[in-house]
Amino acid sequence: MTHLELIAKIEARRKKLNITIVNLSKLSGLGTRTVNRFLAGKDVKLSTVEQITNLLGLDFAGNEVVAFNDLQRRRAKEKALFMVSLVQGTSSLEMQGLEDESIRKMLLKMEKEFLTGSYRNKLWVA
C-alpha cells in the first residue's frame, strides 16, 4: 500500500464519519497543521499516523479494525457519558445528586440522540 492509498482510505473514512479536519485534529490530540500536512501527503511521525488511524478505527494499512457502526456507538457513549457527568456534577453541587437509575436512563437517551436524533451531526464535534 502506498502512502497516497492510505491517505485516500483515511479521507474516505473521515468523510463517512462526517468529521471535519479541525475536529479530527482535536479528537486525535494533534495540531490542525499536522493533520493537514499528513493529508496533503507530507511526511509525519508514525505516531501521528497511529493517532489518526486509531481515532478512525483503522489500522496502519487503512483497513477497518472497528466497524463503522461500533465506532459511532462508542463515540455516542463517550459523548453521552460526558454530558451526563456535567449534569450529575451540577446536581451534586446543588445537593441534588441523581439516582443511578435516572443516570442510566439519561445515558441511554443521550446515546440514542447522538446516534439518531437532532444531535447526530454533532457526534464528532470535539
Image (cartoon, rainbow, N blue to C red):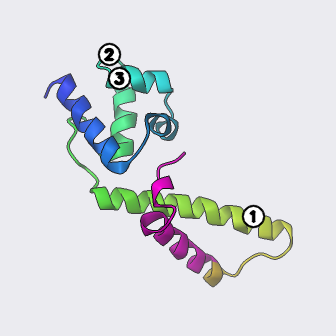
Label whose residue precedes the other's in the sequence (1 or 3): 3
- The kind of residue on which mark 1 rests is Gly
At label 2, which amino acid type do we have? Asp
Give the answer, above or below, for where 115 lies relative to 29: below
User: What percent of the width, then of the height, locates residue 34?
Assistant: 44, 22
Numbered label attached to residue 38: 3
Q: Is residue 117 magenta?
A: yes
Is 30 left, or right, of 40 in this rendering?
right
Q: Secondary structure at mark 2?
A: loop
Q: Which residues are magenta?
A: 103-126
**What is the x, y in percent for residue 58?**
28, 43
Residue ID at (26%, 30%) = 7
Q: Mark 1 = which residue?
A: 89
**Looking at the rendering, which quadrant does residue 21 occupy?**
top left
Disc 3 crowd rating (10 Å Cα; few below 14, some 14-19, many 20+) is some
- The CA span between labels 1 and 3 is 39 Å
Q: Say if mark 1 contacts mark 3, CB within 8 Å.
A: no
Q: Is residue 64 left or right of residue 42?
A: left
Circles 2 and 3: CB distance less than 8 Å?
Answer: no
The amino acid beneath tag 3 is: Phe
